Amino acid sequence: MNADSDSPGPCTRATTMTRRDFLGLGLAATTSGIWLPRIPAPSRIIPSTRQLAWQNARMGVFIHFGINTFTGREWGDGTESPEDFNPSALDARQWAHTAKSAGFRYIILTAKHHDGFCLWPSRVTAHSVKNSPWRGGNGDVVREFVDAAAREGLGAGLYLSPWDRHEPTYGDNARYNDFYVEQLTELLTWYGSITEVWFDGANGEGPNGRRQTYDWERVHRTVRKLQPDALMFSDAGPDIRWVGNEEGAAGDPNWCTVDPARVPAPGVSSPEIIDALQHGDPPSDVTVWRPAEAPVSVRPGWFWHESEDAKVKSAEDLFELYCRCVGRNANLLLNVPPGRDGLLQPADVRALDRFGARLRSAFGEDRARKGLVRREGGSFEITLPEFAEFDTAVMKEEIAAGQSIARYDLEVWRHGAWEQIARGTTVGREKIDRFMPVTTGKMRLVVRESADSPRIGSIALYRTGTPPPGGRNGPHR
Ligand code: FUL
């Protein structure tokens, strides 16, 4: 209905009842095999096919790698020499393999950061790997990265910084826009399928002390034309929006829909804009589907620094991040920077391996499986096959049909009465609620407010063994 159109806007409105809606009038199957009633609504804002696939991927690894890795800086100033770039043992297969094993489904590389140094042999600048000693000047990190991602079945995304502190035409608006579109064209035509293009909002001064006015419309048109299936990320989308911070924390509430007029361009900041990025807006006639992605680094910096080798987040820190981000309806983009050898460092690999194992054990056994779900108005009741102990609920709306729930309670049946164990705002693709362990044979989701008739995709219950965010005094004492 939408996804495959060429229109630059990602938003789609379902106005007619599809065959699937018609067939699903009575009951809809959920991923856990639970059957729930569903009622089609006449008009909803829904994701494109590519947005939906991206949301279902949930987690990506971000690779910040480049000249800064060798100079020890976070923002190079563009005066670095390509001679500095010489990773001794670069192996992109190790990046992709580590990501895949931990459960990440896509990976994004900084093809060019603000310093302007290109990890591929761009034809429009000399400031690239082709003038470095690495692989005798014949290397191409983007090529090795894209091939490694494909081998692991990961989506491959590229970050191309619009801010370029090396390029002399920067600030000479028309000429730099041509230069930038040329670089984008190289990246989008030389390497096969690219799943996400990451546009950073940073827009400082170039080498001549001038600022640049970017031609976003042309940039978006170029991506749509050359890679119709690629999603574009920026503060202002158009397909994916920045979550509004670099800590990996999604907002609460967090809508997949947002009024685009509230964030007119990337790189402009104000409390109102951060609020729009964090929370989105409930679906309405002025909103578009633009789900949030939360970039955060496994280390304090984005690039590798030896001094931060002992400051890598633990698996438990990452699990918390996951709950705050994926568990609040956003995708997690976890940065893991390779070191000077061109490899992810042992401490980072260990953290990711343990994080993957933690996820597998926490969400391995759904204790609600085959539970019978009965709907009464806005209340969805689950009868478990047997009494079970759980401390975490994972709920999903069927977002292919839009996002609706704005406020809800979770209740369990105990001692002959319903008792509240958690309450929340939005659900969306996924909502994770944690509470003190409870044993029961019956629980229910009570939707208190919703933008439309809610469609629940699934409700799963787990024993994850983590206390709720408020600790032992949190929900359900
Ligand atoms: C920011 C950049 O300035 C940082 O260096 C990093 O790339 C981060 C993901 O985005 O805007």
Image (cartoon, rainbow, N blue to C red):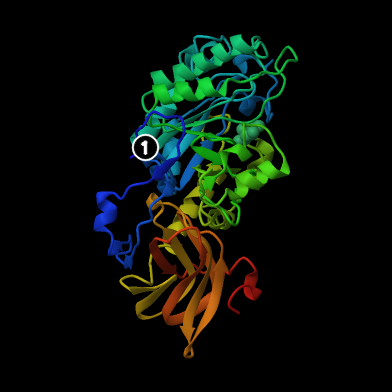
Residue pictured at 54% horizontal, 75% vertical = 421
Side of 281 where 377 appears, left or right: left
Q: Position of residue 366 (x, y in %)?
A: 38, 67
Q: Nearer the viewer, residue 17 or 414?
A: 17
Q: How many marks?
A: 1
- Indicate the quadrant containing the N terminus: top left, top right, bottom left or bottom right: top left
Above or below residue 370? Residue 275 is above
Q: Is residue 350 visible?
A: no
Residue pictured at 63% horizontal, 40% vertical = 262
Q: Nearer the viewer, residue 287 or 209?
A: 287
> Does the residue tagged 1 have its C-beta within 8 Å of any atom of ligand 1?
no
Above or below residue 225? Residue 311 is below
Q: Quadrant of ligand 1?
A: top right
Above or below residue 410? Residue 312 is above
Q: Which residue position is annotated with label 1?
A: 3
Hey, which quadrant is residue 469 in on the image?
A: bottom right
Q: Residue furthest bottom?
A: 416
Q: Position of residue 39 (x, y in %)?
A: 35, 61
Residue pictured at 41% horizontal, 46% vertical = 57
Q: Nearer the viewer, residue 297 or 58?
A: 58
Side of 451 where 276 appears, left or right: right
Describe the element under mark 1 as helix, strand or loop: loop
Residue pictured at 59% horizontal, 25% vertical = 161
